[in-house]
Image (cartoon, rainbow, N blue to C red):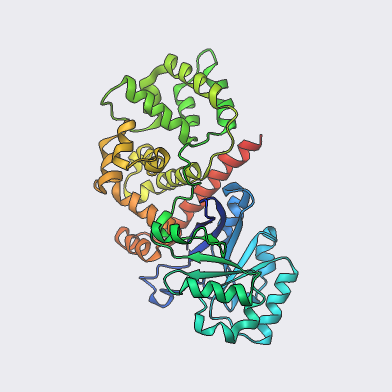
Amino acid sequence: MLATLIPFFDKEMKVSAYALASQKENSLLNPLIFGSRSPNGLAEIEGLDIVHNIGLDTLSPGTDVLIPVSHIAVFSDLESQCDEFRGRVVLVFNGEVENNEGYRNRFSQLKKKGYKLAMSKLPASRYEENKELLSLMDFVILDQKEVDLSTTKIYFRRQYPYIKICVGNIDRQEIFDSIKDDENFYLFEGQFYRIPITKGETEVSPLKANYLQLMNIVNDADFELTEAADVIGRDTALVVELLKMVNHIAINSQVTSIRHAAAILGQKELKKWINTVITKELCADKPNEVARTSMLRAKFMECLAPVFGLGQKSAEVFLMGLFSILNIILGMPMEEALKKITVSKEIEDALVRGKGDLANIYSFVVSYEAADWQEVCRQLIVLNVDTDTIYQAYTETVCWYKEVFYETSRV
């Protein structure tokens, strides 16, 4: 099993929904499932436990979740699988559904029970023959590469003015820029910008819970550096500032982990730094999407480290994941961003040049986030690893995120 959550965002790059993307088996070992967009082609929605485990509000409060449902699964007991998120679930169907009484009745039944519906991958040539089905949809997802957006939007505005149009598969920034302000389009998705942040936002908001815990730790008479370092490691903003400080006082020192950075700074300076930073940032809110993405990526890489033969470098792998979007956090090219802090040569080689022992795990996680299952499956064959091992690591990652960043923030 492979599964991930892909963001849909508005014109300001604020995330408004997440789409579940999944694949049951390695498509290169089982070619019969290759290219299938439904989770398993049967009645059960595979990968849905990811959504159950992490919870919608853990990712971004108020967001919907788009769940692909096959033409067979629509007649299963979807209610028991999705009831926890009723009102927040958008059931997504593709062109395999048929415009007959059975499907129309089932769609009407789901809508009456509070579920939102979306149509995806329906060719424009079939719009008219499926107009009764389309009239039941709340959303339509258009593939930017497959349809003429300028004419299709006119058709939907005239025929179905209540349907929210989402545009997917946007692969270039200039395409997004050309359509984002069009009032006909509601949400956007694509490879051109996989890191979902509010446009112009480069600051990463730390967590109040981490601040309070850190203050209690460092103001103890004889606190442990390792304990403080572990709490700092939960927050991207604090780690960025810590490494900037270390870089200032220890020129050319290659930091391999957050604990290493804390040890270089020492108890006295670490206590002074933490109290100064926390006093300034204590009123900050929950982490934005940059922090969420960097922390999930860091933990996922750490969980995968043994799979890639990097078990002895798990701390360094975590740090690499944390700063794999440092260019977005600081708003500058990666090579320039890494000059602001001090990391090991191996991390720099992987993030800037795509070379070295750490590059493979970085490339794998980026492909996984984008649901590029063909590339993920290729790498799994090379590693001789099954999909369940990867899925277990991802599940562990999202559960860890919920426990550390959501549950503790409510204390």
Residue 140 appears in the figure:
yes
Q: Is residue 371 left or right of residue 17?
A: left
To which quarter of the image does residue 145 belong?
bottom left
Q: In the rendered image of this protein, does residue 230 appear above or below residue 295?
A: above
Residue 330 x/y as whole percent: 40, 37
Q: In the rendered image of this protein, does residue 352 appear above or below residue 125?
A: above
Residue 389 appears in the figure:
no
Task: Work out whether residue 7 or residue 234 is closer to the camera in this orientation and state it.
Answer: 7
Q: In this view, does 251 lie to the left or right of 197?
A: left
Residue 268 x/y as whole percent: 44, 14
To which quarter of the image does residue 193 belong?
bottom left
Q: Which residue is drawn at 44% across and 57% down?
A: 177
Task: Work out whether residue 40 or residue 127 is closer to the camera in this orientation and state it.
Answer: 127
Q: Which residue is drawn at 43% across and 55% down?
A: 369
Residue 21 x/y as whole percent: 50, 63
Residue 336 x/y as whole percent: 30, 37
Q: Which residue is drawn at 28% across and 35% down?
A: 344
**Residue, far right:** 112
In which quadrant will I find the C terminus? top right
Q: In the rendered image of this protein, does residue 125 appear above or below residue 378?
A: below
To which quarter of the image does residue 334 belong?
top left
Q: Which residue is drawn at 59% across and 35% down?
A: 285
